[in-house]
Amino acid sequence: MSHRPVSIYSPGDVFTHPFSAHKRRVLLPVAILYFCAAFQPPCRNNMDNRDNLLGVFQTLYRWRKTIRNVTLLALAGSVVFSLFLDNYYQATTIFYPASPQLANPELMFGNTGQVTEYYGSDRDLDRMAEIATSQELEDFMVTRFRLYEHYGIDSAAKQGPFKVRKIFRSLYKAEKNKNDAIEVSIEDTDPKLAAEMANAARGKINELG
């Protein structure tokens, strides 16, 4: 699965790990806020902060059983619902832009006396980042991996191109990390496909760069 283009330096192969961005076991104890707001005693102009706080505690105590039951029900419902969602896996690849000097044999093997720069400048890094988020790269990924079919979208539909790009963008991320490298991440329910897509994206960025 390793792929090392000539014009970028990569510290390692693409790796995948479980990523539950779309299997969110969100607990929704909204009932607490609801009951506090619905049954809080009316505020009076002459009521001080102490009386307000005391009223809140009294309301919570009065409705404690209802709040507990509704919260447990919401908790159980969210857990059961999450079990029916797909597990997503994230594949990540990290690479650096190479210096244009590496394409010059005289600088690499000659006796010019110049110090060879192996990594690209900030300008090279910005160019790579723009390519990584370009529409040309999106079109390549959609065609290369037949994402219309993979995401279950009708390619002949009027909103087809918009929908497939929207889903791809929600699962694809490319940015400069804190070490001044390009980090590309892709999520998919198939970990092998996610790694292949990350490798292909890195190769296309190298080609366009």
Image (tube, rainbow, N blue to C red):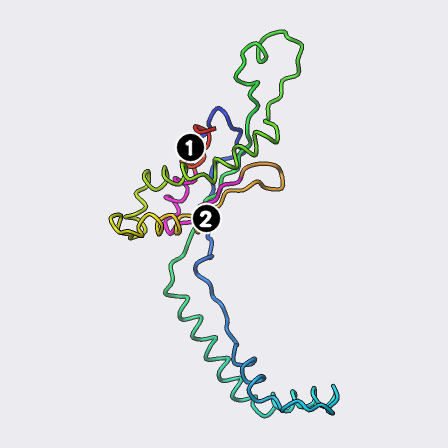
Q: Is residue 194 magenta?
A: yes
Q: Nearer the viewer, residue 112 or 27?
A: 112
Q: Quick check: marks 1 and 2 in contact, CB under 8 Å?
A: no
Q: What span is in magenta?
A: 183-198
Q: Quadrant of the N terminus?
A: top left
Q: CA separation, marks 1 and 2?
A: 19 Å
Label for residue 88?
none
Give residue 43's position: percent from left, percent from top: 66, 89
Instruction: Name above or below for residue 209 compared with residue 114.
Output: below
Disc on the earlier residue, 1 or 2: 2
Q: Quadrant of residue 53?
A: bottom right
The residue shown at (56%, 34%) is 126
Assess whether residue 86 is covered by the magenta stretch.
no
Q: Is residue 193 above or below residue 72?
A: above
Q: Position of residue 189 (x, y in %)?
A: 38, 52
Q: Is residue 86 left or right of residue 106?
A: left
Location of residue 200 by image quarter = top left
Residue ID for mark 2? 90
Relative image position of residue 63 (x, y in whole percent): 56, 90
Query: Percent x, y for residue 35?
Result: 55, 85
Label 2 neighbour load within 10 Å: few <14, some 14-19, many 20+:
many
Q: Is residue 154 left or right of residue 70?
A: left
What residue is drawn where x is 46% and y is 29%?
206
Circle 1: residue type:
Lys
* Secondary structure state at the residue bearing disc 1: helix
Q: Amino acid at mark 2?
A: Gln
Residue assigned mark 1: 204
